[in-house]
Amino acid sequence: MSRMLRRLAVASVCTLMLFAGIAHAQKQGGVLRITHRDNPPSASIHEEATISTDMPFMGVFNNLVVFAPDAKQNRLEAVVPELATSWKYSDDERTLTFQLRDGVKWHDGKPFTAADVKCTWDVVSGKVDGKMRKNPRKTWWFNIKDIAVDNPLQVTFHLNDPQPSFLVMLAGGFSPVYPCHVPAAQMRTHPIGTGPFKFVSFQQNESIKLERNTEYWKPGRPYLDGIEYTIIANRSTAVLALESGKFDMNITGELTPELVKDVQSHVPTMQCVVQPSNTQGNLLINRDRPPFDDAKIRRALGLSIDRKAFSDILSRGVYNIGGAMLAPPEGIWGWTKEFMETVPGYGADVEKSREEGRRIMKELGYGPDKMLQLKVSTRNIPDYRDAAVLLIDHIKNVYIQGELEPLDSSVWYARLLKKDYAVGMNVQGTGVDDPDVMFFENYTCNSERNYTAYCNKDLEVLFRKQSQMKDFEARKQLVWQIDRTLQEDGARPVVFQSQGGTCWWPAVKGLHLAVNSIYNHWRFDDVWLER
Amino acid sequence: MSTTTATGPVTHGLMSTVWYNARRYPLGVAGAIIMIVFVLSAIFATWVAPLDPFSTNAKASLAAPGGTYLMGADMMGRDVFSRLIHGARVSLAVAIGATMIGSGVGAAVGLACGYIGGWFDLLVQRVTEVFQALPLLVMALVITASLGPSLRNTIIAIAIPLIPIVSRVIRSNVLSLREMPYVEAAKATGMSEWRVAIIHVLPNTLAPLIVLATAQLGSTILTEASLSFLGLGVPEPYPSWGRMLSESAAEYVRTAPWLVIYPGLAISLVVFGSNLLGDALRDALDPRQRD
Amino acid sequence: MAPVLEVSGLTTVFHTRRGLVQAVQDVSFSVEAGETLAIVGESGCGKTITALSLMRLIPQPPGEIVSGSVKLDGTDLLRLSEPEMRKMRGGKIAMIFQEPMTALNPLMTIGKQITEMVMLHDGLPKAAARTRAVEMLYHVRIPEPERRAKEYPHQMSGGMRQRAMIAMALACKPKVLVADEPTTALDVTIQAQILDLIGDLQREFGTAVVLITHDLGVVAETAQRVVVMYAGRKVEEASVEDLFANPLHPYPRGLLGSIPRVGSARGLDVSPDERLREISGMVPALNDLPPGCAFAPRCTQADDKCRSQIPPFELKQPNHFAACWQA
Amino acid sequence: MLSYLIRRLLLMVVTLFGVSVAIFLLLRIVPGNIADILFDSAGLIDPAEKQKIVADLGLDLPLPLQYWQWLNGLLHGDLGFSYVSEKPVIDEILPRIPITARLAALAMIFAVCAGVPLGVISAVRQNTKLDYALRVLSLSGLSMPSFWLGLLILMACVRWFGTIPIYDRAPETFWAWLAMLAIPAASVGFRSSALIMRLTRSSMLEVLRQDFVRTAKSKGLSDTAVTYDHALRNAVLPVITTIGVETAFLFGGLIVTETVFNIPGVARFLVEAIRWRDYPMVQNLVMFIAVVVVSVNLIVDLLYMLVDPRIRYSE
């Protein structure tokens, strides 16, 4: 009864606020409380590749450029200035010059200059050893030839080739400007930025606290007095805590579509968004080890997969189906449905594909009585394991008897490196929805994240070609073709493209999420609390 | 006080002994029945389970209990009931495996300590104290972490902390048995130490060993469940009860509570059964500890 | 002189899983002030149950006193309510147990254990009760009673503990003292001291003593009259002199025979041919008694009558009763 | 008495030394180290960079040297730095101890307050319906995994209150602490209380059969006086020992309970540290646990001496 009343009260207050919101200006004050899913490996965004670090610490920093806060889709056209006031390409599009904002100060009081920009990208592109423990996005910056400090307020990036996507990568949440004078070790534990929020504390497995940067360069911002993340590993506990009103929102993309439905049925006023997390499940097939050195078996394996069933089971049919690039309408570069149906293994009639798969296997001497026995390795994490369990169930249809081999996280990459696996189930995220990021990070011969060591020099030429193309439509067509080749080659067959839910109370205002990435909108300088 | 009760039960063979004890310990019988059902369903899981515990089904995802899915289905559309029955294998394997290894090695160490004594006993005592300075779960946690998650390693991880528990009891038992008149008498007749140990002492430590082992059976199942709950126990593809519970706990406490309730119920019931049986066995075999 | 304690027709049974066990059947006796009555028998003959029945300390269930009366100064203890009986226990009728090692609370000082009782029955304040406790310890000839009162049972020897036990039992000057094998667990040298002590105190306080023992030597030294029990029944009752001189029932005859030179200290004569004669066989299980005389299976003189009919307990000679067809 | 204490303390040192060697070695068998884990979170494979981290942290040094460095630091009060947070270990552990300590204390208080009286009742009313009910209750307490009980409580809270008790920030007042920790403490203490109850019951039954209880009755004491003044004191002796052993066991329960209720205590932290292969953290936490367990056992033994004159005077 009291719960009903409370809900009613909340609902009516929210309705009131909805109307009031139009009339009232943004409100100053309040601490935004967010549930966090796990312990971030460190506070240094440049060293990590997880939303666990990206979301809570993005507010500490600024980029040179960002995606416009209210942009629905993260793309080149949405890039706007941040620490850079403007940018200019040279005529050959091989130099990119940024004018920098004057009077910006780091949280420790030191002034921000062009040297900091050079420092940052010298390190992340691998030109200088910045004492970082790891540098997961080195491949993003393959095109940087040199960075020149023209004067304290002007910096120039010299590129090897024209690259329209360069700005897109600079605009992502994973590309903050780091202070030159702060050592990498400190950035991991007590980051210093120019952003709207200052770092206060990071208690392992407990909480992350940020407070308002009163000297933020953007006048009147941020509105919030601070942001607090509380780490709650158990997802249902986190949801209940959110619903109880102890928190304002949850870490982005962490709720399953099922949970989002549940939350909204209990708290109808809760604002929820389910969107692609730009995370995909894909198969790592060891093509050096028999029998997968035989392209036919790789193909048969690919034909057994019912991507619709993956989507249905893992997300009640919400997950996108596509190739390496995120499928439209959310994704920019993904195949259209029509194109996809022409790709082998993506046909609408799964039974037909499986029939074809069985035929291939029979030719090779396998059958219901002589199943191919193999191990399906995966990380011992529910997301990975669930997908692997489904995979094992699917490949049964083409006479392959898979046995799950869950590996401890500490062992997983070591095994990949040693190529000690037959089939691996892998789940991975990508920071920005862009072919340059996707292809260079995962499919170039020498990338550290190219787990299968798939190496196709001809295709790599095409990677570079598309990267330099200015014409969007033409580039997209090429990307589709590349993606198709990748899937046909079984480089890393993509099984599903995940979506995740984010919920927040209506009192949280000014929050914008993009549809094709969860990593890039957590500056929080426009967000305010209406209560 | 002079005894007024009559002499022991008149036994006419094994069956009547069983029947007599069954009448005396009805709770023990209940425990035995639970354990028998548990063991049988573990052994004959393939025939008992109505559905394939590994087969996924998009249409049955999170089906509520009832109909085809007696205890509902999990997210993958796998039948919870069938998975529980197959999960009994894991629990049984861990319970029997860890208890046997733990009791076997523990008994051997205990006997050796009681008999060899001296520096050996002293050394083992210190090692035992090291083990006892750490909670069982912490010990098992570190061991599974260091060996990696697998059924075999889980068994080892749970068995190792059992060894000192068992060896201590057996040791003190041996020490007291050595002072027993009939053992002294046997020695007086010129029997060798080892003959005495095997003929007179060993059989007499068997009863406390059985009692102790049965009592540990339940706790090993609980430890396995806890390890699995923390993500360090028996991994997929074996459907372990603890892991079934832990994964559902993260997600379905509210949307699909049957995924949390039934695995927990299965664990509790089996441990309850083994405790009942253990109590009855203790009463029957070890009169000194009788209530 | 009227007897202080008059027991008649006392019958105590135990309800066990294997049926009803008749632990004590129709036992009667009486004791006068200052007198010592010994109840003798092998273990399992029901003498301890008799003693506990007098105190109403039979665990209930499974035990039950089904009939009879235990009159203490004319009051039937068996008819008292439990609170009334509590006032009697320790106050009017006290008991000493066989095992001084275990009969005292190991976590309480000796003094406290006596004090507790004195306070309860005589309503004395704590200090006075304590003084009495020390006095009693002095009475039982414990050296340094002040210091000993502060000690715990485990700090004392067996004999000391039994003295303390006696001190406790007699602290409230009970009319009747039930002593259940008070010396069995003690060394022979201590045994005599304890028996002397009981005798001395008995004279001093005029207490009636019911002495339960299996040791005929003890009987000969301390008791005036003897009741012999077998399988829960009285089989013979007589004065010590009469019994030792002329045991009527074959059981006591056997008992006397099994210990040599018994009673020689008091000049009682035991015929040489009856010495060292063992009683073969075992005391029968009380739930599985033979139909006739319970002793018949072990009796060399038993005939068919003995095996089929229970002999009545009757006067065979002046002041000498027995239950035997052959006597 | 003093020599006994010294002997015990020396043995404690030996035990702790053994623990330190054991945990040190166990951790080094673990496949994968902190570098693997760090790279794992970034999805990277780069043996060269990993090697750099390993060298930075001194993990490539010979084991005896690594052990000596740790032990030497430990003896000088320097616990080193966490591999993950790169903060001093002491700063990570210290703030978490009070939370776990409060939870454990509350659980133990609950266990004793519920276990001992119920055990006594069960023993005094042996073989009555109440006794059977209590025995089944205690047995089910021993049979239920504490995390499941915790989850059931959470589910009940969701069902009836629509929300759950969750540790979202440190409570400020004593009562707030109590409110926060009561439910987790009860769910973890239930097992201990069941154990204590069983033990009290059987110990009580045994004591009630002993001669001195009969003596006490023969003195005319009331049942209450016999039960509480004489029997109970003797019956709690083995219970005290169990409380010591159970304190060690309780910690295991705390690991899962802190996980279920999201309490940022030491116990849950240990699991995370193991997961991260954060050697300094795991080593020092385990040592801390061992010190606590060993000390509790010593305290219990001393307490035992205090209560039981037989032991007190024989030493």
Image (tube, grey):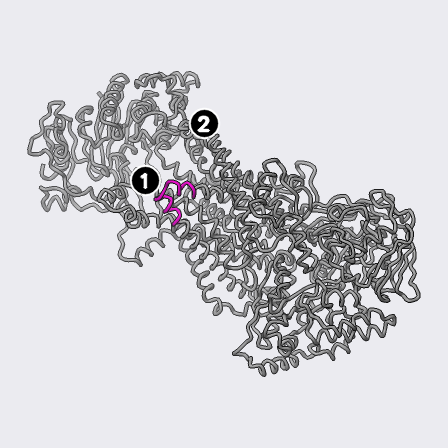
Q: Amino acid type of disc 1? A: Gly
Element class at badge 1: strand
Chain on which label 2 sits: D
Q: Is residue C3 visible?
A: no
| Dominant secondary structure (helix, strand or loop) of the stretch shown in magenta | helix
Q: Is residue C32 visible?
A: yes
Does B111 lie within the magenta span?
yes
User: Relative to A410, does residue C226 appear above or below in the rendering?
Assistant: above
Residue C116 placed where, x, y %? 41, 24
Q: Of discs 2 and 1, which sits in the foreground?
A: 2
Element class at badge 2: loop
Q: State if disc 1 and disc 2 touch (CB < 8 Å).
A: no
Q: Which mark is residue C63?
A: 1
Which sits in the foreground, A259 or A298?
Answer: A298
Residue D133 placed where, x, y %? 47, 47
User: Relative to C144, does residue A182 appear above or below in the rendering?
Assistant: below
Q: Which mark is residue D29?
A: none
Task: Magenta stretch: give its range.
Answer: B107-123
- For disc 2, the neighbor class at 10 Å (few under 14, some 14 to 19, many from 20) is few
The image quadrant that residue D38 belongs to is: bottom right
- Horizontally, residue C138 falls left or right of residue C46, namely right
Q: Is disc 1 on the same chain as disc 2?
A: no
User: Relative to D23, does residue C172 appear above or below in the rendering?
Assistant: above
Residue highlighted by disc 2: D1
- Horizontally, residue A14 falls left or right of residue C245, namely right
Cα separation between marks 2 and 1: 46 Å
Residue B36 placed where, x, y %? 42, 60
